[in-house]
Image (cartoon, coloured by chain):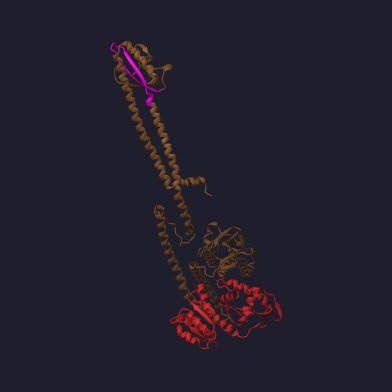
Chain colours: A red, B brown
Amino acid sequence: MPHILVIEDDEITAREIVLELAVHGISADRVHDGLQGLQRAREPHYDAITLDLMLPGMDGLSLVKQLRDSGITTPVLMISALGDVDERVRGLRAGGDDYLTKPFAPDEMAARIEVLLRRHRQEQPAQTKLRVADLELDMITRIARRGGRELTLLPTEYRLLEFLMRYPGQVLTRAMIFESVWGLRFDPGTNLIDVHIARLRRKVDIDGEPSLIRTMRGSGYRLG
Amino acid sequence: MVNPAKNLSIHWRATTSRLLLAYGVFFVIWGMVLLGSIYWETLHYLESRTDMQLQQQITYLRSLDREHMLIALNDYVILERTNYNAWGLFDAHGKWEYGDILQFPTGLMVDSASVRLPTEKVVGGPFAPPTPTLSVIAAHLPDGEVLVLAHTTRIAARVGSIILHALWWGLSFTLVPGLIGGLILNRGPRRRIRQIESATQPIMRGDLRQRLPVGKRGDELDRLAAIVNDMLDQIEQLMGEVKGVCDSIAHDLRTPLTRLRSQLYRVQQQMREEDPNAALIERCTTDIDEVLARFRALLRISELEDRRRREGFVAVDLGRTLQQVYELYAPLAEDQQQHLVLEADQGLIVQADPDLLFEALGNLVGNAIKFTPPGGHVALRAIRTGPDVAHIEVADSGPGIPEEQRQAVWQRFYRGDGNREEAGHGLGLSIVAAIAKLHDFELRIDGDETGTRMGMDCRLQLPA
């Protein structure tokens, strides 16, 4: 069971985070201020950290910088009331792994934490092949197969499938897909990502069988 | 192009021109009064001189004996021929005896002051002088005869015409250069008005940070410009406050809405798939997401509008960016049975924030797809229009935007009358406008009822 450190001074937000993580089977410890947060973050048993950027004691940016300087690589999800693009860039430069603007949908937060956890776990062995059910993706030859049948994918479709296959069984929100596959953060309207998924489905799915890419009500998509 | 007739009327409407005209009229009247009184005084003087002369002459002639008098009268006529003199001698009964006045002029009193009579009443025939009146005097001689002397008023008429000429020339010499000078003087203020006019253009387009130029002269125009600037300060401050209030509303409402959304989400998670209320909850969640998206867009526009720095600007290849936008939106167009075409010239490099440029173009394409009926087409183009200018545009075959609404589409929450039922928050194009402004790209919108072309002119970065 993954264990998370929540560094957050706002009572309601902290409760929401802890509650939502519990729903996803993730346990969490909560700390109120920056100095204490830094101290706890150095402990090795945390799989990820959610970090508010405006904290009493020490601000989030300095905290993450010090953490990285001391060689700790625990993934950090930064949470800030500042939606400014520059603020986000600054946060990621300081060593944050992802950035979420307050107020956020808890499922979005949880989905991002899960991606961080998995990405961190995956980092050790360099994979060249991804496999989900009978779907196979060779990242060296860039060929995807479904049950032996080769799929002809456009570059965008390939990137989208690769992203979905990296996090099988996990909810990926539209914003996360848009950020990771296209590297963009604006609001393209829900429709746009849906259309891309629909196209990918037509290539990946087998007629008569339920789709491998499931639509998750109110949040996003899940492969497998 | 300035219409010359309109230009002239602008000239005449100018304050200086009006003042000049008023002065001109005043000057003409005053000049006429002045010269008129001189004319009248001079004429009066000359006439009284003539009268006096006639009086003296007749008194002198009366004192001579008859023979000498007749000789003197002849000499008098010959010597002063140029001024024309005439005389006549009548007996006590008024019968003509000598001289070129053949008949005693009617209306002439004997032994009184001279009078002015019409020429034809005094002399006729070939000897008649060209002047319309003559000064005439009559007196009894000691033997009962009556002597009549006449003298032309030609000198007075001459003087009159000289004065009239003087009046005419004087007016021409003062009025014509005066008018020309006035027009030249008018140019300075007009140039400044034009400067003010061009300074107001960006303000009218919504850039409230601009101010009118205020010179050091401190004259009326400067004072007016300063007043307008003060007013703009006030407007800018008020607009800022309004925007601030809007932003805080958007900002503050996001938290409770997000909380509402997460509660709905939790309820949804606890429901079984086949629960009939699941679809209802799903719809609620979608609606809340839409409101939240609207607030996000609103705050995003504010953020873009407040951003004045150009940090993050790099050289961006328009062709490549358009290609990426094309790849992102092509499936959406295909889904709506539309043709999305890409036409981009090679080697167009601009200084831009690549993500923002992508966002602007994406919004334009998304908007075009939304308003184009199935079977229509949307074109994404980047064309070099000058040595250092390129035009990016998104052309669609949608219903078009009426000319009078074209500027309004860039405003927040604007949606065309016919399109209200369409999805979308009406903020996408405002985001485009904010991004274009940040980049100093000039927005353009053209088209007719067969389609719309929305785009922006951007300055190219020339190879070093």
Coordinates of residue B382 in the picture (x, y in percent): 61, 63
Say if the magenta span includes residue B151: yes
**Figure label count:** 0
The answer to whether one can see residue B92 in this image is: no
Coordinates of residue A207 in the picture (x, y in percent): 68, 77
Coordinates of residue A64 in the picture (x, y in percent): 50, 81
Coordinates of residue A132 in the picture (x, y in percent): 65, 83
The answer to whether one can see residue B419 in this image is: yes
Nearer the observer, B259 or B144: B144
- Quarter occupied by the C terminus of chain A: bottom right
- Quarter occupied by the N terminus of chain A: bottom right
Nearer the observer, B297 or B164: B164
Nearer the observer, B300 or A60: A60
Magenta residues span B131-156
Say if the magenta span includes residue A152: no
Residue at 48% of width from left, 83% of height from top? A7
* Left or right, residue B331 beside residue B103: right
Relative to B309, does residue B266 appear above or below in the rendering? below
